Structures are given as C-alpha cells and as structure tokens.
Amino acid sequence: MTKGEEKRSLWRNILEASTVPLNVVVSTFVGLAMGYGLDKLFGTSPYLT
C-alpha cells in the first residue's frame, strides 16, 4: 500500500466513523419534529414528543 493509499484509507475510515453520530443526531431531531407535528395534529401535547 502506498502512502497516498494509506492517507486515502485513513480519511475514508474517519468519514465512515463520523456518519454514526450524525445519524443519531439527525434521527433524534426528525423524531422530535414528527412528535411535535403529530401532537399538533391530534391535540395530544405533550404525549408524542
């Protein structure tokens, strides 16, 4: 493996590892937004958030 390939592999691993926390944060906010929307739709605040 050349030095350029090692550097590219390192960046690829860093980018793949950074997707996990990003997915957790995005999923949390999407769920929160859906809960608020459903609460407004059904008038059930604060049960779905």
Image (cartoon, rainbow, N blue to C red):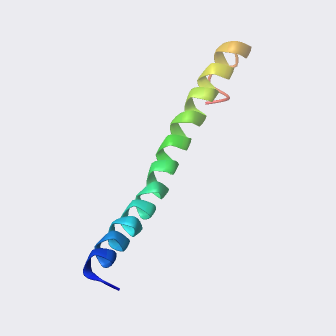
List the single residue furthest toward the left: 3
Nearer to the camera, 1 or 20: 1
Measured from the top left, where is residue 20 in percent x and y? 49, 57
On-image quarter of the N terminus? bottom left
Q: Quadrant of residue 21?
A: bottom left
Position of residue 13 relative to residue 36, above or below, is below
Nearer to the camera, 31 or 19: 19
For the point 70% across and 14% down, the residue is 41
Residue at screen point 39% across, 66% down: 12
Residue 18 in percent (x, y) is at: 41, 58
Question: Is 20 rendered above or below residue 3?
Answer: above
Q: Which residue is at the front of the view, 19 or 34?
A: 19
Residue at the spot x=67%, y=28% of the render?
A: 47
Q: Position of residue 35 (x, y in %)?
A: 63, 28
In the rendered view of the protein, which quadrant contains the C terminus? top right
Give me the residue at 50% from left, 41% from top. 26
Residue 19 to residue 3: above or below: above
Q: Left or right: 22 with respect to 49? A: left
Q: Which corner quadrant of the image does residue 32 belong to?
A: top right
Instruction: Determine the residue located farthest toward the bottom in the rendered image.
Output: 1
Query: Along the horizontal axis of the image, is 47 left or right of 19?
Result: right
What is the tally of numbered marks visible in this picture?
Answer: 0
Seen in the picture, residue 18 relative to 24 is either above or below; the reply is below
| Left/right of residue 4 with respect to residue 15 in the rendered view | left
